[in-house]
Image: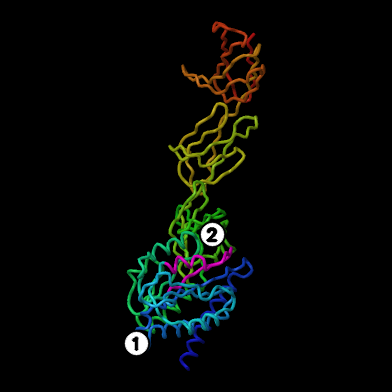
Amino acid sequence: MILKRFIIAFFAIFIIGISSDLKGQRGVEEEPPLTRILFVFDASQSMYARWQNEMRITIARNLLTELLDSLEHIDNLELALRVYGHQKRFPPQDCDDTRLEVPFAPGNASRIRHRLRTITPKGTTPIAMSLEAARHDFPQCDNCRNIIILITDGIEECGGDPCAASRALQKDGIVLRPFVIGIGRDFRADFECVGQYFDATSEFEFRESLRVVISQALETTTSQVNLLDESGNPTETNVPITFYDNMSGKILKNIIHTINAKGNPDTLYYFDPLVTYDMVVHTIPPVTVEGIEIHAGTHNIIGADTPQGSLSLAVGGRTPMNYYTIVRKAGETETLHVQKFSEVIKYLIGEYDLEILSMPRLIVENVEIKQNHNTKVEIPGPGIAVIRLPAPGYAKLFKEKGNELTEIYSFREGVLNETLYLLPGSYRVVYRSRASTSTVFSIERRFNVDTGSTTTVTFN
């Protein structure tokens, strides 16, 4: 009796401390999630086997009951109990023998304790079926952490695939990675694919496994994201970051990275040790870090190489122009960003190709972006070409370079006067009146454009 009181007091002090940490650290920043723990309990016939000084069912029931005593007054926590192998005797084998005995509800630890006392082991071990059925044990919730703790003294006996059932639950975002406690002997090879496995070959190890599982399920943790510059220092910041569940692909959190008042990357309190994360840092181009493991009870450092410099664009001369520029990685065709000349934009260090949407389009290749440096690209200012057609017809404008003509503009039918802002260079207009029915009436005009000047082109 004294030992039981000591165990209950230990669990209570341990878990109340965890709960207090969660409250203190999260403060008023955001509502903490509701943690929901579903115990999936083995009551198959083999639980009658002797285990040290008692039957397995007796030890498992007593230790789980003690744990429930310590969890009873934890905030933001709900419990439920699913049991398998307890409704139909073996033989014959009944692989549908699984049932949610106590559903989730606030303050239902006493109901679970009572149900545990009345369970009699009878049947087989349908673990995969129990995990598949557990999908429906968690009511819809927008801010919940759903956890399964499977307690078993044997492996799947009904031909199901517990590993596939567990993966499906995680991929669909129903539960976080389950915990599995194996009683009596080591089932690690069978259950490591189901979840985090704990080997309880003795009563002491079972008690310790329960303690560790609950600590990992409820214990707070802290993290920080280091956005590293070229020297490996965490100086980059003010960048949006998206965190995904690696298993389900679900978006879990969006933040803007921040350097705090002490000059360090800000501490984050909402990472879950039971989730494997993928992170996308929305630099240009974005940086992805996959398979991030968070360790409970310690401060986690998440790093990403994001050295950046900036690019600014300018137009020479006195004519104000706000061109758009397509930015690509050097030698590649994918558009990374569209930048206006009025903007200063950060990019990861490296070389980029620019396609400036002037007339004609201007290609600037291998522009180098350096760490903490602004690279300025200036293009010549445009001149103005006023083109007057004598009658409605068909006309195109070409840029002339040596013996090569590149079409840059198609005149609108029915419009007799066009005013175009053109980069300096040599041009030709080829025109034919709509009323003309012979190619001999085609006319061309050559002209030059200089920065800041106006050129009038007529077909008199």
Residue 13 seen: no
Which residue lies at the image location 49% right of the left edge and 19% below the top edge? 405
Task: Name the residue type under label 1.
Answer: Gln
For the record, the magenta segment spans 129-150
Closer to us: 203 or 260: 203
Residue found at the far bottom of this picture: 2
Q: Which residue bears the numbered disc 1? A: 52
Colouring: rainbow
Q: Quadrant of residue 379?
A: top right
Marks 1,2: beta carbons within 8 A: no
Distance between the alpha carbons at the discs numbered 1 and 2: 45 Å
Closer to us: 149 or 307: 149
Q: Which residue bears the numbered disc 2? A: 252
Task: Name the residue type under label 2.
Answer: Leu
Magenta stretch: includes residue 148: yes
Closer to us: 352 or 328: 328
Q: Position of residue 195 (x, y in %)?
A: 41, 68
Q: Please, is residue 355 above or below residue 17 in the view?
A: above
Which residue lies at the image location 35% right of the left edge and 72% below the top edge? 155
Q: Please, is residue 324 above or below residue 280 in the view?
A: above
